[in-house]
Amino acid sequence: MSSNNELRFEQGRKHRRALLKKLKPNSIALLPAASLQTRSHDTEFNFRQNSDFYYLSGFTEDNALLALIRRPAGNKVVLFCQPKDKTKELWTGILTGPEKAVELLDIDEAWSMTDIDKQMPELMNGCERVYYSIGNHDGFDARVTAWVKDLRARSRQGAVPPVAFEMLDPLVHEMRLFKDAAEIKLMQKAADISARAHCRAMLAAREGRNEYHLEAELQHEFMMSGARFPAYNSIVAAGANACILHYIENRMPLKNGDLVLIDAGCEYEYYAADITRTFPVSGKFSKEQKALYEIVLEAQLKAIEAVKPGVVSDEPHNITVKVITAGLVKLGLLKGKVSTLIKDGAYRDFYMHGAGHWLGIDVHDAGSYQKGETRRPFEPGMVTTIEPGIYVAPDNRKVAKKWRGIGIRIEDDVLVTRNGHRVLTDGVPKTIKDIEALMATRKE
């Protein structure tokens, strides 16, 4: 077994032990695996495991269910998975099977999914509480209900059905918010691969190519580095396309005089990176592009500097709003008093999104942004993006024509440490000087 497999199974054991301590006595937690999704007719999308299921198991097969049981007599972990099937394995690959799963995952029991309707009521019998995220798993809601009904129907024979249901998501997602050393190592690897991919795309940019040519460069670096998939649909937006926040058409031509905004990151061993850089097709920023870029860069650097334990997690966003609003006033794109413009939300015509989000197994990762009724503070182990931007819509008649159609975003992944922060994605240049210097090395 590869070291990566050993790591993911060990992490699964560690996370299960931690979750079991959070469950109330005499309870059972149920978590189904993801399902295969049809792409067209009889073909499926590449399978990607449910993030919570993966976090607690490291198991990457579909058609499975994980059950964690906490009882005074002792805890139990049970997996239901696909049985060994030579015909299916001939077509789609080797299945682990229940017997081998017990050893690999270091769990107490494993059963075939064909036995689940018989075995699950027995596992639930005597559990007062069921932790299960109702409404999140197609098909399983009805099965869980059926298992409870089975126990109720047998209550006169001594069966003890659950009396309470509780959502499992909040417990698991609070755990996922804090990354340990092994997770941080994977995220750094994803960040390093993604940084190289961005540099590769910058070097490949030139007039006459299309956005998809740069996307191909990104994907090549991802896959050649062991990251088979992007963490999300790559955004390669040239010219005014950069003013569309989640633009993914990636088919328009590159033109000298335009900027290219690339928002892309790979997924490495299920952990995501998320980087945005904006650069000129020609290799040189114009005067107007420089002016707006410097505002965004200043906002990002000041926001990153604020990331440290104890700082409220929306403070970086507030900083970016102040810097961007003041910068737009200085350039004449906004008119008025900065504080008033912020209060009235006038900056939202140019900066309409938040400055960051949690990052981890999901690119918009799990974990609440609130703690009680207030915004939660940063704590060591959290990873957040910092990604301010300015977008001047091509049809914005309130500003001079020279500004229209310019879209700029700069994004990095930032780990909260005990004493401050660490930028995981600093392998990509982001100052005007450094970007132009890198692009000056392009070969025709």
Image: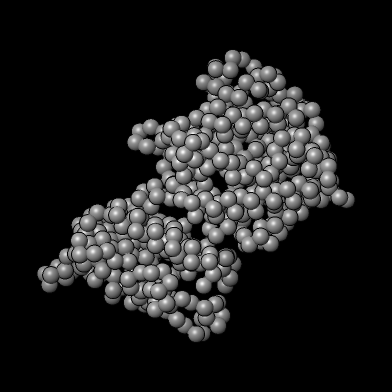
Where residue 152 sits in the image (x, y, percent)?
Answer: 18, 66
Tell me which residue sits at (75%, 24%) in the image: 400
Where residue 85 sits in the image (x, y, percent)?
Answer: 47, 83
Q: Nearer the viewer, residue 384 or 120?
A: 384
Vertical relation: 248 (above or below) 223: above
Q: In the figure, is residue 150 to the left or right of 317? A: left
Vertical relation: 420 (above or below) 68: above
Colour approach in the figure? one colour
Tell me which residue sits at (61%, 29%) in the image: 299
The residue positioned farthest toward the front in the image shown: 419
Vertical relation: 92 (above or below) 235: below
Q: In the figure, is residue 305 to the left or right of 152? A: right
Tell me which residue sits at (43%, 32%) in the image: 310
Q: In the figure, is residue 234 to the left or right of 383? A: right
Q: Nearer the viewer, residue 419 or 229?
A: 419
* Picture quadrant of residue 18: bottom left
Where residue 50 sits in the image (x, y, percent)?
Answer: 46, 60
The residue positioned farthest toward the right in the image shown: 444
Where residue 71 sits in the image (x, y, percent)?
Answer: 22, 62
Q: In the figure, is residue 294 to the left or right of 105? A: right
Tell me which residue sits at (78%, 43%) in the image: 438
* Picture quadrant of residue 14: bottom left
Q: Is residue 36 visible?
A: no
Q: Is residue 433 visible?
A: yes
